[in-house]
Image (spheres, rainbow, N blue to C red):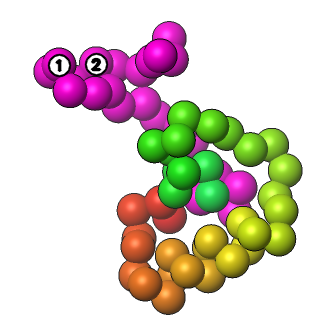
Amino acid sequence: MIADDAIRVLDHGFVRLDDAMADDLSVVNAARVSFARRKEVMEESDVGLIRFLMREHHGTPF
C-alpha cells in the first residue's frame, strides 16, 4: 500500500517527502521507512538506532 502523498517512480516504488526540519524522531522514522511504519514517541531502542547510524556513517536518514 502506497500513501496518498507518494509519487510513484517507474514501476518499482515511490518517493515521499516526510519532513523538512528533522528531529530525532524524524531520523528514526526515516531510517525505518522501508517497514512502512511511523512512530509518534521516541523509545530507548530508538536512541540506540541513532547512535548506530552515526557510528556506521549512515547519513541518509539525517
Q: Is residue 40 above or below residue 14?
A: below
Asked whether the beta carbons under mark 1 and mark 2 sit within 8 Å of each other, the answer is yes
Q: From the viewer's perspective, tell me whether residue 21 is left or right of residue 58.
A: right
- Residue corresponding to mark 1: 11
Residue drawn at (35%, 31%) of the image: 15
Q: Quick check: can you spot residue 10?
A: yes
Disc 1 on helix, strand or loop? Answer: loop
Q: Main secondary structure of the magenta part?
A: loop
In x, y percent, where is residue 45? 75, 69
In x, y percent, where is residue 61? 48, 60
Residue type, mark 2 in image: Arg
Q: Is residue 14 above or below residue 33?
A: above
Q: From the viewer's perspective, tell me whether residue 15 is left or right of residue 48.
A: left
- Residue corresponding to mark 2: 8
Q: State yes or no: residue 43 in magenta.
A: no
In x, y percent, where is residue 28? 63, 58
Q: Is residue 50 above or below residue 32?
A: below
Residue drawn at (54%, 35%) of the image: 36
User: Dot 2 surroundings within 10 Å: few (below 14), some, or many (20 or more)?
Assistant: few
User: Dot 1 surroundings within 10 Å: few (below 14), some, or many (20 or more)?
Assistant: few
Q: From the viewer's perspective, tell me whether residue 46 is left or right of residue 9.
A: right
Disc 2 on helix, strand or loop? Answer: strand
Residue drawn at (69%, 77%) of the image: 48
Label placed on residue 59: none
Q: Quadrant of residue 23?
A: bottom right
Q: Which residues are magenta?
A: 1-27
Residue drawn at (28%, 27%) of the image: 13
Cα gap from disc 1 to disc 2, whole angstroms:
7 Å
Residue type, mark 1 in image: Asp
